[in-house]
Image (cartoon, rainbow, N blue to C red):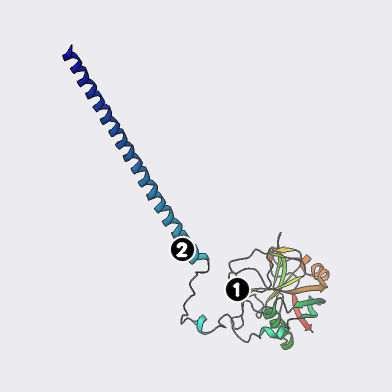
Amino acid sequence: MAHKRAGDRHSKTQQQLLRQYEARQAVHAHQQTRRRRDNLIAIGAIVVVAALAGLAQFFYFAAGPGVPTPEPTSSASAEDPTTDIVGDVPDPSLAEGRTWSGTLTLDAAGTALPLGIELDGAAAPQAVSTIVQAASDGTYLGTTCHRLVSGATAQLLQCGSADGTGAADPTFAYGPIENAPADDVYPAGTIAMARLSDDASSNGRQFFIVTADTTLPSDTAGGYSVVGRVTSGLDALVADVVAAGTENGSADGPPAVGVTITGLTIQ
């Protein structure tokens, strides 16, 4: 009996030791798992902080007050601030920042078409100064209205080409674009400057008269400089010139009724 009790005590002791060992192993395993979890959390936090720091730096230098100031270069534009001016372009101050009124007289196959006009020297000082100078010099006299557009969304008459073809004048050009409508809509009667596509510095002396509400989508340079409006005579222009269409019957071409500028007076 004593031997059996001793064996029982030994068995109980072994079982107790086993339970203690298993408990220690479980604690150790839990500690290892927790340590791995804590390490992963710490690494994740470091990654997030680094990413946020990188984004903050990107936005600061790309779109915020940290945009680097460009260093001056030896390019022509840096040395000559008037590189977008070609020829004897008048100073914008000639427009005097005021409204000008006057008469543009067109001859349509022998019929005089006087148009009352109003020019906004405050909204488009450079372009209006050009027209004021041209009126003083008689530059427009004898030039033609070479292009009639009568499409579904655009209707206009373009005038003032030096050679009558609509080609740009290489001796006279300027920028920038002034007073272009934000919505690309040019109401009937609008007077605006013509230019080359995608070139904000190619304004010249050519202009166009919008004969019906027109949408002209902006290009990469923007819209077109609106200098003023026709205050009277637009109906006669539409009836005598626009209604006759183009020479070849297309929606864009030389008007079938020849149109010449015979007078321009403004004050």
Q: Nearer the viewer, residue 180 or 235?
A: 180
Q: Which of 70 and 231 is in front in this view?
A: 70
The residue beneath circle 2 is 57
* Res 266 quadrant in image: bottom right
- Secondary structure of the residue carrying tag 1 is loop
Q: How crowded is mark 1: few (under 14 residues within 10 Å), some or many (20 or more)?
A: many
Report x, y in % for residue 52. Answer: 46, 57
239 lies above or below 125: above
Q: Which residue lies furthest to the front in this view?
A: 2
* Res 91 quadrant in image: bottom right
123 lies above or below 88: above
- Secondary structure of the residue carrying tag 2 is helix
Report x, y in % for residue 196. Answer: 60, 72
37 lies above or below 94: above
Q: Which residue lies furthest to the left in this view?
A: 3
60 sits left or right of 265 in the view: left
Could you tell me the amino acid type at mark 1? Ala
Which mark is drawn over residue 200? 1
